[in-house]
Amino acid sequence: MERGGQALGPTDGRGDAMTLVCTVLPTFNERDNIAALIEGILTNAVAPHMILVVDDSSPDGTAEVVRSLAARYNSADQLRVALYVRIGQKGLTSAIQCGIDFALETFGADIVTWMDCDLSMPPADVARLVRAILEEGADIAVGSRWVKGGADAAHGWMARTLSRIINSFAVLLLGGVVHDYTSGFIAARAPVLRTLRLRGDYGEYCIDLLARAVRVGFVVKEVPYICVPRTAGESKTGANLWDYLVKGRKYVATIWNLWEERRT
């Protein structure tokens, strides 16, 4: 598929009756990272796996790189790489939700995963999240920096400290099933994503999704991973202290609102 419905390959990503996994990659100016990310995910896949890139009209040529990968990976009977270019739309949460909707309704995915596209989340670790669902009975698997075996080597002390504070606050108010509420590195079964749509503008969607999933009884498991520095492009997490504080304020407000909802 492509913007406007033009096909890059067949619309059926399932090559057999096994579980189909679709990884949604929301991109903006990730030309130098996207090929290594897609290839790393597909190379390490543990089940039939396809990639859906949702690109917010990147001016750097991200979409062109994805098109070339689609030509290489797709065949007459299997779609492994698909692209959707959004025009006049932008934003992390809406891009992920757009991808989830396509993954479920168009491709019939049984498991949907998503992650940052800057290679800070190692592509090989997607398979570990999928295994937590297939082999350990999780409904949602979360890549976690803040459990044993996990770490954040990508960010400076300021970002790590603020993340620790926010996640400790979330654990205190929302419960300790999850320790990395701001992960953004997720795999989930289709029934979870049909029940719970994403809410929020940026990373607060992850806090909201995980808290609501625990509340309604879905099984959430954390999988440790090491967040590593991006090697190309500009970070969208936070450019300075003010940016971190603005985003952090939304995270705290989301945690508080979820706690208030639970009390009522």
Image: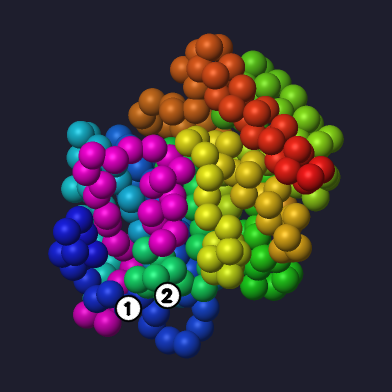
Q: Who is closer to the viewer here, 261 or 72?
A: 261
Q: Who is closer to the viewer here, 260 or 138?
A: 260
Q: Is residue 159 left or right of residue 201?
A: right
Which residue is label 2 attached to? 108
Q: Is residue 116 left or right of residue 255?
A: left
Instruction: Give the amino acid type for the residue marked by disc 1 in the picture.
Output: Asp
> Reading the chain from its start, which is encountered first: label 2 or label 1?
1
Secondary structure, mark 2, is loop
Q: Is residue 241 above or below residue 151?
A: above
Q: CA distance from mark 2 to mark 1?
A: 8 Å
User: Mark 2 near mark 1, Cβ–Cβ under 8 Å?
Assistant: yes
Give the residues drawn in magenta, as a range. Answer: 76-101
Label 2 Cα crowd, 10 Å radius (few <14 / some 14-19 / many 20+)? some
Residue, x 49% and y 28% (percent of image)? Answer: 237
- Look at the image and tell me whether residue 164 can be seen: no
Q: Who is closer to the viewer here, 230 or 243?
A: 243
Secondary structure, mark 1, is loop
Label 1 Cα crowd, 10 Å radius (few <14 / some 14-19 / many 20+)? some
- Quadrant including the C terminus: top right
* Residue 79 belongs to the span the image colors magenta: yes
Instruction: Give the amino acid type for the residue marked by disc 2 in the picture.
Output: Gly
Q: Is residue 118 above or below residue 67?
A: above
Residue 222 at x, y percent in the picture = 72, 52
Residue, x 71% and y 28% (percent of image)? Answer: 166
Residue, x 73% and y 69% (percent of image)? Answer: 136
Which residue is label 1 attached to? 12
Residue 158 at x, y percent in the picture = 64, 16
- Quadrant including the N terminus: bottom left
